[in-house]
Amino acid sequence: MLSILGLTRRFGARAILHDLALDLGAGEYVAVVGESGAGKSTLLNLIAGLDVPDGGQIRIDGTDIAALDEDARTRLRRTRVGFVFQAFHILPHLNLAQNVELPLVLLGTPPSERTVRVRELLTAVGLGDREASLPRELSGGELQRVAVARALVHRPALVLADEPTGNLDPDTADRVLALLARAIKARGAAGVLVTHSEHAAATADRVLRLDHGRLVPA
């Protein structure tokens, strides 16, 4: 599902990621922990094709995304990848249901199916009664839950999550982490969670540490 080999990313003279390797099969869920500035978010951005590596390969279902042009990477993200951004990226002029629905609109999913999936996901993250609310009416923790629902609504083959519980209380965090794990397992997807939280990391199948640009067992 996901294969990374020899991945290198430099910023100036500094190699943030160096000769990094990772293999994930269908249904596998890995957590990556590391200090701030270690390159965790950089790694996710590279996997999603939002950034381009200086060396190495990133293959999703056999496709080397670094070899694709920007339009092709966008199409791959739209169809195969679900990304929970640390900064949410919720559109302020759309209500919650519309924000979550957006990936399905872009894919041309029929309206009746869109409605069902959006309600399922908003209910799963505890916001089933807030479909018509605008983002400005929500707390940071609630916006984070909307971001999780949006990332899962199109049933992606690869789920990437950047600190998805950073703004959540412990009970809600556990609920969101369980939802992520279920979504990955139920559909045979692969998942990469990056986090500072050892508790969050423990919900994954295995935990790796990003150390001097490489992934090592935690």
Image (cartoon, rainbow, N blue to C red):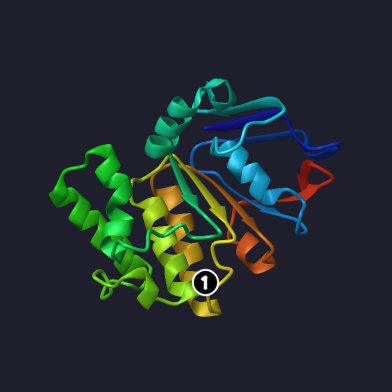
Q: Is residue 39 left or right of residue 46?
A: right
Whether residue 201 is visible, yes or no, is: yes
Question: Which SS class for mark 1?
Answer: helix
Residue at the image position 52 percent from the left and 55 percent from the top: 85
Residue at the image position 29 percent from the left and 41 percent from the top: 106
On the image, the x and y values in percent for residue 209 come to 76, 51
On the image, the x and y values in percent for residue 174 come to 51, 71
Q: Is residue 69 left or right of residue 14?
A: left
Which of the 4 image quadrants contains residue 55? top right
On the image, the x and y values in percent for residue 83 come to 48, 49
Check disc 1 and report the residue beneath it.
173
Q: In front here: 103 or 175?
A: 103
Which of the 4 image quadrants contains residue 130? bottom left
Residue at the image position 59 percent from the left and 43 percent from the top: 45
Vertical relation: 13 (above or below) 151: above
On the image, the x and y values in percent for residue 68 come to 52, 22
Residue at the image position 24 percent from the left and 70 percent from the top: 132
